Image (cartoon, rainbow, N blue to C red):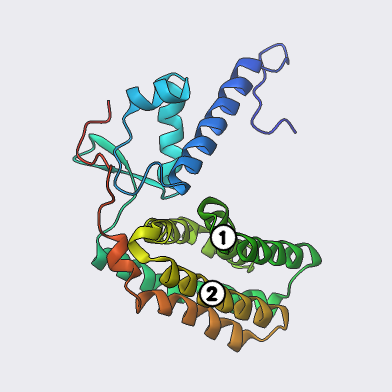
């Protein structure tokens, strides 16, 4: 199987296509990292001309990358289809999304507890928890965010219900939305940030241990409680506040 590689009529591989797709993957990876690092905070307009120059690529792979990132929920079309911007939601909309997350995460944890962890998945989840431990103090936002997102996505991906795969973008979007207030130490303060990370990690371990033990009811309860804690916190209101430096309402070029 050649996967995404294309063949010419004489059976040879079209290396131009392979190179183009690899370039798009590189652009996607780079933009994801800029978003996770808050160099492109929620609400930032993604100006094609400026980004193409910054990344050293043409606008064609950049447009392809935008389409894929939009499917992932990391960027969205705004301003009457004239602007591509990093996804940002109002407090009311984000709260509604997290209400759905509570159900999704609870169901995924319960189903995975029923199915059971493979040795490989057990190792993956343990490694993600360890990464969050390591990067919480001192706080290393980019690494912590990626491990945090990976933990929740892996549970939903491996729970055995293929319909939940359609919800992965919602998990990514809502998780990403909280990166802003968690990333900004000055806004939260180091003591509040440390407490948020500590409580979140306790909840992550409770979810993992319940799944590992095959306790469906406990796994669902802990997963739902984890999301409910966000709903009852002030993080959602803070996430809805535009970050400094965003360029909303500018044309996408």
With respect to residue 64, does 157 lie above or below? below
| Occupied quadrant, residue 213 | bottom right
Q: Residue at 23%, 37% (x, y): give it.
A: 81
* Tag shown at residue 2: none
Q: Residue at 64%, 68% (x, y): give it.
A: 160
Q: Which quadrant would the N terminus be assigned to in this image?
A: top right
State the image coordinates of residue 240 (x, y, percent, origin top left). Answer: 27, 60
Q: Residue at 55%, 62% (x, y): give it.
A: 148
Q: How many marks?
A: 2
| Local secondary structure at mark 1 | loop
State the image coordinates of residue 225 (x, y, percent, origin top left). Answer: 47, 82
Direction from residue 227 to residue 41 in the image, left or right = left
State the image coordinates of residue 168 (x, y, percent, origin top left). Answer: 50, 58
* Tag shown at residue 198: 2
State the image coordinates of residue 242 (x, y, percent, origin top left). Answer: 25, 52
The answer to which of 19 and 187 lies nearer the viewer is 187
Q: Which numbered disc, 2 or 1, marks the residue that appears first in the sequence?
A: 1
Mark 2 neighbour density, 10 Å: few (under 14) some (14–19) many (20 or more): some
Q: Residue at 70%, 83% (x, y): give it.
A: 214
Direction from residue 79 to residue 178 in the image, left or right = right
**Location of mark 1 (residue):** 138
Q: CA distance from mark 2 to mark 1?
A: 12 Å
| Occupied quadrant, residue 154 | bottom right
Mark 1 neighbour density, 10 Å: few (under 14) some (14–19) many (20 or more): few
Toward the right, the furthest residue is 119
């Amino acid at each position: 199987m050649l996967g995404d590689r294309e063949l010419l009529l004489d059976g040879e591989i079209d290396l131009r296509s392979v190179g183009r797709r690899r370039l798009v993957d590189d652009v996607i990876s780079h933009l994801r990292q800029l978003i996770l690092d808050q160099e492109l905070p929620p609400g930032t307009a993604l100006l094609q001309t400026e980004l193409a120059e910054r990344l050293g690529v043409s606008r064609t792979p950049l447009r392809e990358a935008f389409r894929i990132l939009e499917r992932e929920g990391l960027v969205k079309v705004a301003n009457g289809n004239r602007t591509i911007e990093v996804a940002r939601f109002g407090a009311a909309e984000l709260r509604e999304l997290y209400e759905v997350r509570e159900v999704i995460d609870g169901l995924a944890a319960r189903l995975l507890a029923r199915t059971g962890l493979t040795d490989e998945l057990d190792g993956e989840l343990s490694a993600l928890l360890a990464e969050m431990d390591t990067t919480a103090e001192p706080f290393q936002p980019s690494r912590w965010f990626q491990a945090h997102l990976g933990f929740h996505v892996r549970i939903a991906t491996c729970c055995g219900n293929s319909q939940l795969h359609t919800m992965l973008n919602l998990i990514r979007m809502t998780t990403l939305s909280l990166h802003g207030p968690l990333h900004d130490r000055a806004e939260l303060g180091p003591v509040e940030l440390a407490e948020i990370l500590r409580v979140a990690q306790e909840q992550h371990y409770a979810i993992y241990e319940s799944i590992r033990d095959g306790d469906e009811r406990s796994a669902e309860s802990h997963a739902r409680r984890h999301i409910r804690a966000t709903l009852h916190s002030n993080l959602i209101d803070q996430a809805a506040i535009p970050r400094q430096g965003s360029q909303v309402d500018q044309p996408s070029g």
